[in-house]
Image (spheres, grey):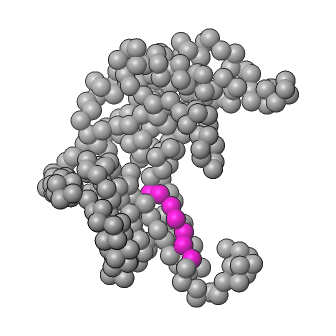
Amino acid sequence: LQATDKKLGRKPNAQRRFIVVEGLYKNLGTVAPLDKIVELKHKYHYRLILDESFSFGTLGTTGRGALEVFGKRPMYDAEIMTIALENSLGSIGGVTVGNEEVVDHQRLSGAGYCFSASAPPFTASAAIASLEIIESQPELVQRLQANVEYMYEQLDAKLTKKLVVTSDTRSPIVVLQLERESIYEAAIMNGTMQECLRRGVAVVATGQDSSSHMRTVLAPCIRMTVSTLHTKEDIDKAVETLVESAELVASKYPLEATAGDSTKAS
């Protein structure tokens, strides 16, 4: 950081220096190490912009997100927080949380003020109602986190060596990848998804087609999402179906063929 600041001619007290992270990464299911990030932020005088879109309502004792998990304070440890309303709150749009200066800037520079494109009142009312439910029924977050814990326990007990869990065990977004790289990764993941769907379980498969527009190309994977409404029977069926489907599909491909073999062959 110091070398970059020197190269760019930044002064130690420069204000326009930001670290931008997600509390919970949608495509990876990993949780940002906010304890270390906040330490760096304070040490090098950066501001932290934290996207809690997928961590809000899922992480932390009361569902307040990644900041709550690490015991950090809004507006001090994270100057700006953004939250999409279409996830835990089941509405449309988003909110920004910050000090008065940040909120005023967002209000005066946002599309709603400049172009009269603000969210309809009913979507804001829906988000407020959802928030009130989460606050008044803390058992919803507790049940979700219990389901997440049970899901990872079952995966740990029943997964074969073909698939491995790569997401954080606190994450309701569960990500699995092949244990070994293979030129058939995308095909295996897509085939597993189709077989799971045929058996009545919907999972998401990501491959090169979904990563072509990204700056960083992600490895093909299977992604599942745990919810509060899932029962243990639902989770048992999902895990059993996933394991059996992955075994069936992977058996059709020579997993010893790695990506490196493809490069050599070409």
In the image, residue 205 lies at what x, y percent? 50, 30
Residue 153 can be seen in this image: no
| Quarter of the view holding residue 67 | bottom left
Res. 149 image quadrant? top left
Q: Is residue 73 shown left or right of residue 190?
A: left
Q: Residue at x 16, y 54 (%)?
A: 122
The answer to whether 132 appears left or right of 200 in the picture is left
The quarter of the rendered structure image containing the C terminus is top right
Q: Where are the magenta residues, as a range?
A: 17-23
Residue drawn at (64%, 87%) of the image: 11
Q: Estimate the x, y position of residue 76 in percent, counting from the top left.
A: 41, 78
Q: Looking at the image, is 70 positioned above or below residue 165?
A: below
Q: What is the quadrant of residue 83 in the picture?
A: bottom left
- Magenta residues, dominant SS class: strand
Q: Residue at x 30, y 62 (%)?
A: 117
Compared across the picture, whether 21 is left or right of 101 comes to right
Q: Nearer the viewer, residue 130 or 38?
A: 130
Residue shown at the point (47%, 18%) measured from the top left: 194
Q: For the N terminus, which image quadrant? A: bottom right
Residue 237 visible in rendering:
yes
Q: Is residue 51 above or below residue 26?
A: below
Outermost residue, front side: 115
Whether 133 is drawn above or below 220: the answer is below
Q: Is residue 266 shown in magenta?
A: no
Residue 151 horizontal/vertical position (percent)? 38, 33
Number of callouts: 0
Residue 261 screen position, x and y as percent? 80, 26
